[in-house]
Image: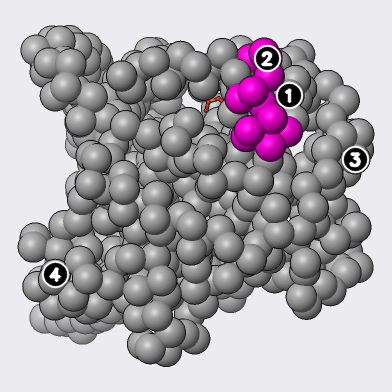
Amino acid sequence: MSVTGVQGEERNDFTKQESRQIRARSLRLLGSLLHPMRGKVTLAMLVVVVSTAAQVAGPALIAFGIDNGLPALMKQNWIPLAATGGIYLVTGVIGALLIAWYTVMSARISQAILIDLRKRIFLHTQKLSLEFHESYTSGRIISRQTSDLDAIRELLDSGINQLLQGVLYMVFTAIALFSLDGLSGLVLFASLIPLAILTRWFQVRSQTLFRTSRVASARLIVHFVETMTGIRAVKAFRKEKRNEKEFGSLVEDYRDVNGRVIQLFGIFDPGLVLIGNVTVAIVLLVGGFRVVEGHLAIGALLAALLYTRRFFDPMEEMAMFYNSYQSAAAALEKISGVLEERPGVSDPVKPVDLWKATGAVRFDDVQFAYTADRVILPHFTLDLPAGQTIALVGSTGAGKSTLAKLISRFYDPTQGSVQLDGVDLRDLHPKDLRRAIVMVTQEAYLFSGSVAENIAIGKPEATRDEIRRAATAVGAHDFIEGLPNGYDTDVNKRGGRVSAGQRQLISFARAFLADPAVLILDEATSSLDIPSERLVQEALQTLLADRTAVIIAHRLSTVAIADRVLVMEQGTIIEDGTPDELISGSGRFAQLHAAWRDSLV
Ligand SMILES: Nc1ncnc2c1ncn2[C@@H]1O[C@H](COP(=O)(O)OP(=O)(O)OP(=O)(O)O)[C@@H](O)[C@H]1O
């Protein structure tokens, strides 16, 4: 995993080199997003240049009309004034048309960029291995698709327009003022000193404040997402009041920081107005004397005043741009971090095809660690012959799920290899791997859609008959028929809700239909009531037949259907034998079994 990617985004203490890397990564992403529309972007920029120039021409034309058109009109010559008015009108219309075109075009460009980015985030995060998803919380990944994209949208939709138009407007206005009246230009130039001081002051303070505001808002969202995803635990442990307090305090933080942002603008905005007014007053004073002395025409003074006044107009919008720029830059950094994340498990360059696996699994001197500082499996060698049903037991944290994840190739071993029919999983064609090895997790996740669609996930081309047969085999058919729309019932709609046991049966039917050579089952624990447990136990017998099966057994009753029991502790197998052998022995499993039997009486 990259230093600055997944783990890095919550850090704020980057070295210079890391900051450079992050900036380069963001720019690469921006470049790749803009590249396909470079033609349109260039054209849009040219249009902004022309339309801004058209707007800036206004006061100069007014000056010309007053200083040349009016005297000519007094001499019965109306042509200069009419021509000036005509040109004013035409530039106004052209400017308006260009702005209309630009508005539509820039919105289209921004839409295309955002859709491209949205797709990239989705496709890439879906492709990333479990290693990434286990370290990246859902709240954070949701933010990438929501608030981060919103920040970029805001920048593209209004921020860049404001900046580009604002900068051009100020530059063109200053040039026009200098060419119209050099002295007024110099006054404006002098006003840049207090303006620079005020802007710098605003920039320094706003940088921290805007960032704090973003963090406060992100904390609110993360708290909300975590509360909602863990709503069952919240209710079970009566955490509502505590959560309400925590959320309330986060809202307070958010309000405080935004209060400080408002105060900042409360100084910056009037500061701008003051500098603008003082500059206009000086231009008026200096210009007025020169008009009286005959060194400056009255129209030119009027235009100089208009230019001076308008020069300050884009400043406030540009200050807002700074905020959206910061948010978008931070969002771009986080998104580029995710997009440059490489899957921990990569597809083989020359994949080996294995059309019909028998299901023999071998751990060949496997060493595995999630993080460099802690080895989970030290030296692990194990053979699981094809067709055997293996129950894996052991205390919590022993490494049972880790073993399952390695067989499913959610992770690769740090050393050694996991093999299917003698082929290293790393060399196996991903399609063959997914067909041959299926894992049924405890949560028995159902996707939105019908029951039939949920069963057919492992074999999308399955006919309705095949789906029905699979459901019947695992004893799910009867309850499915009893649902409001049978197999077409939407599992996420009211009325289509299924119990935990039924959900598990649907996931068994799914696995049965997929018909893998190796089935891994992380057995559900306490969520099932007694009748559901019996149903699931019966279904298991059918599901496990004729394939290699590894059950992470939480219920010792399940062990009875296994050919072999493996007892695991701290990443090693400490007992290995048939259930009867181990029960009649004096080892760890015999003790566990005796305690369980006693608890039943
Ligand atoms: N994604 C992960 N990152 C870092 N460490 C992990 C990760 N998943 C598991 N571990 C650690 O690996 C060890 C083995 O975990 P594993 O989930 O395989 O145990 P288990 O035997 O399945 O436990 P349980 O019966 O509680 O599910 C534990 O110490 C756990 O903290």
Query: At label 1, which amino acid type do we have?
Result: Glu
Check if residue 582 falls in the magenta segment. yes
In the depicted structure, whether residue 591 falls above or below residue 269: above
What's the residue type where badge 2 is placed?
Gly
Q: Residue at x 84, y 52 (%)?
A: 419
Residue at the image point whose x is 68% and y is 56% from the top: 548
Specify start and end residues of the magenta stretch as a single range. Answer: 577-588
Query: Mark 4 and mark 1: span between their CA atoms?
Result: 45 Å
Along the horizontal axis of the image, is 249 left or right of 151? Answer: left
Where is mark 3, residue-wise?
364
Q: Which residue is mark 4?
A: 483
- Give the answer, above or below, for where 241 lies relative to 537: above
Sooner in the amino-acid sequence: mark 4 or mark 2 = 4
Query: Where residue 195 sits: x, y (%)?
Result: 37, 22
Cβ of mark 1 under 8 A from ligand 1? no
- Which residue, given by chain and number where applicable, does mark 1 sit on? 575
